[in-house]
Amino acid sequence: MKVHLKAFASFKDILGKEKDVNVKEGASVGELLEDLSSKNTKLKDAIFDETGQLRDYVILMKNRKSIEHMEGLNTKLSEGDEVAILPPVAGG
């Protein structure tokens, strides 16, 4: 199944701005990230710490809603979902 990936700021430099990604049926956001980072060490270092945990500053969205308000990395994906990867946003 296909999901649409959007990356912003430093993540855009690693992944490109946006692309469609094939994932297995019923995959989670965490499985998507593991698959992407297994093919890209820069992404792995940017998203996961040395223990394999998601870095605190990584913001993940599914269909414009934070996965923190869903099931975190266990949030299931469906055909056509949009996943966004963002760094923290600050202004002043």
Image (tube, grey):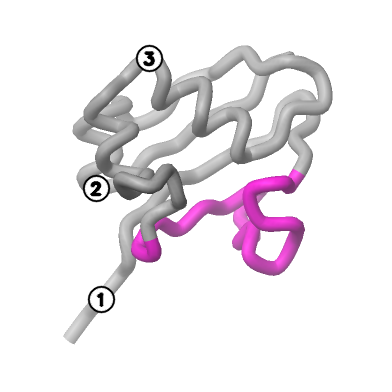
Alpha carbon of mark 3 to alpha carbon of mark 1: how far? Answer: 30 Å
Residue ID for mark 2: 9
Task: Pick whichever of labels 2 and 3 is earlier in the sequence.
Answer: 2
Which residue type carries mark 3? Lys
Residue ID for mark 3: 39
Judge the density around disc 1: few (<14), some (14-19), many (≥20) Cα neighbours within 10 Å. Answer: few
Left or right relative to 41: residue 79: right
Query: Residue 47 appears in which quarter of the rendering?
Result: top left
Judge the density around disc 2: few (<14), some (14-19), many (≥20) Cα neighbours within 10 Å. Answer: some
Alpha carbon of mark 1 to alpha carbon of mark 2: how far? Answer: 12 Å
Query: Which of the pair 6/41 is nearer the observer?
Result: 41
The correct choice, above or below, for 6 with respect to 38 in the image is below
Which disc, if any, is residue 37? none
The residue segment tinted magenta is 56-75
Q: Could you tell me which residue is drawn at 37 percent across and 45 percent down?
A: 48
Query: Which of the pair 80/41 is nearer the observer?
Result: 41
The answer to whether mark 1 and mark 2 are in CB contact below 8 A is no
The percent position of residue 28, horizontal first and vertical second, equals: 70, 36
Which residue type carries mark 2? Ala
Foreground: disc 2 or disc 3: 3
The correct choice, above or below, for 1 with respect to 11 in the image is above
Task: Pick whichever of labels 1 and 2 is earlier in the sequence.
Answer: 2
Which residue type carries mark 1? Ala
Residue ID for mark 1: 90
Figure quadrant of the N terminus: top right
